[in-house]
Amino acid sequence: MTDFTATRAMFDLPEGVIYLDGNSLGPLPRAVPARVEQTIRAEWGEMLITGWNKAGWMDLPARVGDRVGKLIGAPAGSVVMGDTLSIKVYQALASALELRSGRRVILSDSGNFPSDLYMADGLCRTLGPEYRLKTVAPEAVEDAIDETIAVLMITEVDYRTGRKHDMARLIARAHQMGALVVWDLAHSAGAIPVDVTGADTDFAVGCSYKYLNSGPGGPAFIYVAPRLAESVRPALSGWLGHEAPFAFDLDYRPGAGIDRMRVGTPSILQLAALDAALDVWDGVDMADLRARSLELQEIFITRVAAECPDLALASPREGTQRGSQVSFRHPHGYAIIQALIAEGVIGDFRAPDILRFGFTPLYLSQQDVEQAADKLCAILRENRWDRPEFHQRAKVT
């Protein structure tokens, strides 16, 4: 059994704060500052440019990628780190479309993260008017997969409501219809059990600064199924995806396997932070994590439903249909979240009316969750949210 008391001790959590926003930005693991300082002082500071060889910087994207791969059921050598999630979405989509050259439609759903849709739409515009992005309601995705679809692009867990798609079922349907699948695992990796191999997915992408705790702006990852890795052509043909980057050949030749999905120079400081953060997972069983997350969510939902009738549950009531977050709706959701933050409970808001809470057993206890629910309901009961400062919108909500 996973010892979540031990994992909680591995995080540097602010005193007096209950953190329910790890689904947006994970908190700081205690091992990260020392590792980053070592990278800055002992490696960059002492080795200078020789750190690319001496400190193994050039190998970090693949080595850390393998560590992330273990959390999503990917075999060694099939995941690489680098760039941002939007870039990885673009890479995966472009490669998948080229592999299905006789088709022109990307299918997604209206619950997908907007940036994924923007990247898909932009790619279609670049490729020409015959290409298009088709979006349907999340519940209608399976029925919309037909012989016209080239690529199904889906975020497994809805960033607003936590609604969870059935990965294996949708992949099976897509493959039956001859389509490829790109999964965005931004709200899945480190939150719920994922098995990209068992589900037979084609591509998967995700960020590392949420449940993997790499810090703000941490690098993204991309997975390509080994059966496709030698046939995909990277649309973003960066120099580090070249077969021999330091030959400085003017003609691009893709690297072997997943290496070809590298683009630019990796962010070494953030990769070092992620590498240290991943140590937290060494003793964690994902089945234990999932079970405990659902327990904490149930405690929160039950308490809020009983004491906060003005909040409407936006997430599925059945736990197996959710990721690791719970959302509620209220017309003054933004102000309520600001009032809650002022009282030491950090959740977040998503337009137009979503109050969003993440449940990460690595550092959250039952007492935390109960106290958070009590404070939320007291704020609503006493209208403590209705103050001018709580209605004033900040740049980041």
Image: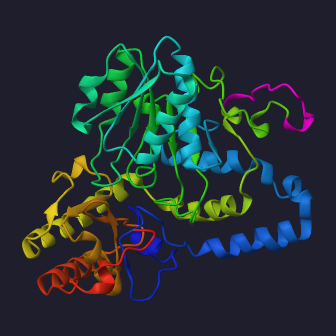
Q: Residue at x 33, y 85 (%)?
A: 389
Q: How is the image coloured?
A: rainbow
Image: 119 above or below 141: below
Screen quadrant of the C terminus: bottom left
Give the mark count: 0
Give left or right: position of 47 versus 24. right
Q: Quadrant of residue 44?
A: bottom right
Give left or right: position of 259 versus 365. right
Q: Is residue 73 visible?
A: no
Q: Is residue 140 visible?
A: yes
Image: 98 above or below 119: above
Residue 396 lies, in percent from the top left, at 44, 68
Residue furthest to the top in view is 102
Residue 225 lies, in percent from the top left, at 55, 29
Residue range (magenta): 245-257
Which of 295 and 162 lies nearest the eye of the viewer? 162
Screen quadrant of the N terminus: bottom left
Residue 34 among magenta residues: no
Q: Residue at x 16, y 85 (%)?
A: 383
Which of 30 and 244 lies nearest the eye of the viewer? 244
Image: 1 above or below 226: below
- The secondary structure that most of the magenta stretch takes on is loop
Residue 376 lies, in percent from the top left, at 21, 79
Q: Quadrant of residue 363?
A: bottom left
Residue furthest to the front in view is 129
Q: Residue at x 71, y 70 (%)?
A: 36
